[in-house]
């Protein structure tokens, strides 16, 4: 007999497993066969110890996630799918790529909803890569920056080189070896800016290093991006819009050697110069030095030949000039000797005439100066006599005035004599021989002496 279902407020109560089993049955009936589904692998979640893979699948609209669901690829299927994907695309399954998969929708009461992936179409992924690549090229052309880096002028001798690569990369090793071990002995200044060169992280790494180089652009002549070969999926980061735009608008020429002949990426297209391998890039730079060296050698040869011709011509011209100079010098010396004799005669005659004229003029000046001196002395003597007479008169008058002033002062001093003051009825009081001017100077018992015009008296202070 079936047990009676529990209720709550008149409503039946179900267990979680019953609901989960119901969902399982509904999905089994609704989605009985596998479906082709487009999605992006956000995370691969491959576990080598078990061989199983649990990719996180998403659908995005721009950067916003519209849908997300867990995938399952069992180990036996994952090996087959991954091997075929590697064979066609050149690389294994990885994160951040779009895929078209054949998957069955499954719901487990214990593990929840998932897509059981049975197959993945590698050609779809390649197609997505090509579509993204075409959109990137069109956008760069629409913005007018597609050819910007190619229009920059590569220095005649690109000696200072910034390199974006991995120090352990064979491509970097090939580039440095080819560049530095050249038979002509050309020397270069290189600096490595390490970055991941493959996958989504390569976009951030290379872009970041380009920013660092741009902040020091006066230190470099060009930038080189080199790596070893790889499949189309491995190179998909070089079709990224942000990275391609960063290369296209970079202020220094950029040279790339990042793939094989069939892997022309958008970054290759917008770079100033792109070559197949890092070694080719090194040869391109060396070729600029070799071309310049050949031009210098050619110019050196032409300059030497031209110099020899010029020297020979100048020697002939110098000999002719020397002959003309000797003849002209002899003739000129003879002419100047005659002219000098004539001038010496003229100067001697002129000197005698000038001496006579100057002597006559000097005699006239002497007589005139003598007469003028006598007149001047007479005038100054008369002036001194006048000044002496005036000084005597002024002195007598000044003495008379000063005597009168002294007599007046004497009369005033006599009037101020103490005897004259006492005659007018005043007296002088003294204590211990000193005149008393204030009552505060005295105390009881002090003996005072009072002086009158005629006679003195003594008194005692009572209070």
Image: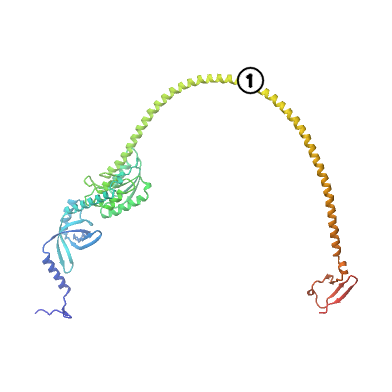
x, y (%) of residue 343? 61, 21
Residue 408 is drawn in which quadrant?
bottom right
Whether residue 139 is visible here, answered yes or no, is: yes
Q: Quadrant of the N terminus?
A: bottom left
Whether residue 431 is visible here, answered yes or no, is: no
Q: Quadrant of the C terminus?
A: bottom right
Q: Image height check: is 343 above or below 401?
A: above
In the picture, measured across the screen, residue 286 lies left or right of residue 123, that is right
- Residue at 81% x, 44% y is 387
Mark 1, secondary structure of its residue: helix
- Residue at 75% x, 30% y is 366
x, y (%) of residue 235? 24, 50
x, y (%) of residue 66? 22, 62
Q: Image height check: is 7 above or below 400?
A: below
In the picture, measured across the screen, residue 461 lies left or right of residue 299, that is right
| Residue with the most extreme left position | 1
- Residue at 86% x, 73% y is 449
Q: Which of 285 and 145 is in front in this view?
A: 145
Q: Image height check: is 179 above or below 139?
A: above
Q: Judge the density around disc 1: few (<14), some (14-19), many (≥20) Cα neighbours within 10 Å.
A: few
x, y (%) of residue 85? 17, 53
Q: Mark 1 points at which residue?
A: 345
In the picture, measured across the screen, residue 98 lies left or right of residue 287, that is left
Q: Nearer the viewer, residue 265 or 55?
A: 265
Residue 56 is drawn in which quadrant?
bottom left
Q: Image height check: is 226 above or below 100?
A: above
Image coloring type: rainbow
């Amino acid at each position: 007999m079936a047990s009676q279902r529990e209720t709550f407020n008149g409503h039946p109560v179900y267990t979680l497993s019953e609901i989960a089993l119901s969902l399982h049955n509904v999905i089994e009936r609704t989605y009985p066969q596998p479906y082709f589904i487009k999605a992006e692998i956000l995370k691969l979640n491959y576990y080598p110890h078990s061989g199983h893979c649990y990719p996180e699948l998403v659908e995005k609209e721009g950067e916003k996630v519209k849908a997300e669901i867990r995938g399952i690829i069992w180990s036996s299927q994952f090996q087959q799918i991954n091997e075929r994907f590697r064979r066609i695309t050149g690389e294994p399954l990885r994160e951040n790529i779009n895929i078209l998969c054949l998957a069955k929708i499954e719901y487990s009461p214990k593990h929840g909803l998932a897509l059981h992936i049975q197959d993945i179409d590698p050609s779809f992924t390649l197609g997505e890569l090509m579509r993204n690549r075409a959109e990137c090229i069109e956008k760069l052309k629409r913005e007018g920056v597609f050819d910007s880096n190619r229009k920059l002028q590569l220095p005649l001798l690109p000696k200072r080189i910034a390199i974006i690569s991995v120090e352990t990369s064979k491509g970097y090793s090939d580039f440095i070896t080819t560049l530095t071990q050249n038979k002509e002995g050309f020397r270069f200044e290189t600096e490595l800016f390490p970055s991941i060169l493959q996958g989504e992280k390569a976009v951030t790494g290379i872009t970041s290093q380009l920013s660092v180089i741009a902040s020091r652009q006066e230190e470099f002549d060009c930038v080189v991006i080199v790596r070893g070969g790889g499949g189309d999926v491995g190179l998909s980061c070089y079709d990224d819009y942000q990275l391609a735009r960063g290369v296209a608008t970079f202020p220094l020429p950029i040279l790339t050697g990042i793939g094989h002949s069939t892997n022309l990426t958008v970054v290759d297209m917008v770079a100033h110069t792109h070559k197949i391998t890092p070694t080719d890039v090194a040869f391109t730079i060396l070729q600029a030095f070799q071309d310049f060296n050949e031009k210098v050698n050619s110019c050196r040869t032409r300059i030497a030949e031209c110099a020899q011709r010029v020297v020979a011509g100048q020697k002939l011209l110098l000999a002719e000039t020397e002959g003309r100079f000797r003849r002209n010098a002899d003739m000129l010396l003879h002419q100047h000797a005659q002219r000098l004799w004539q001038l010496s005669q003229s100067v001697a005659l002129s000197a005698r005439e000038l001496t006579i004229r100057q002597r006559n003029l000097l005699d006239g000046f002497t007589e005139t100066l003598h007469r003028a001196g006598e007149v001047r002395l007479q005038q100054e003597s008369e002036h001194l006599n006048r000044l002496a007479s005036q000084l005597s008169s002024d002195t007598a008058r000044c003495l008379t005035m000063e005597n009168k002033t002294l007599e007046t002062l004497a009369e005033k001093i006599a009037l101020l004599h103490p005897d004259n003051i006492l005659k007018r009825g005043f007296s002088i009081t003294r204590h211990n021989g000193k005149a008393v001017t204030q009552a505060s100077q005295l105390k009881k018992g002090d003996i005072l002496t009072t002086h009158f015009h005629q006679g003195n008296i003594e008194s005692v202070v009572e209070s």
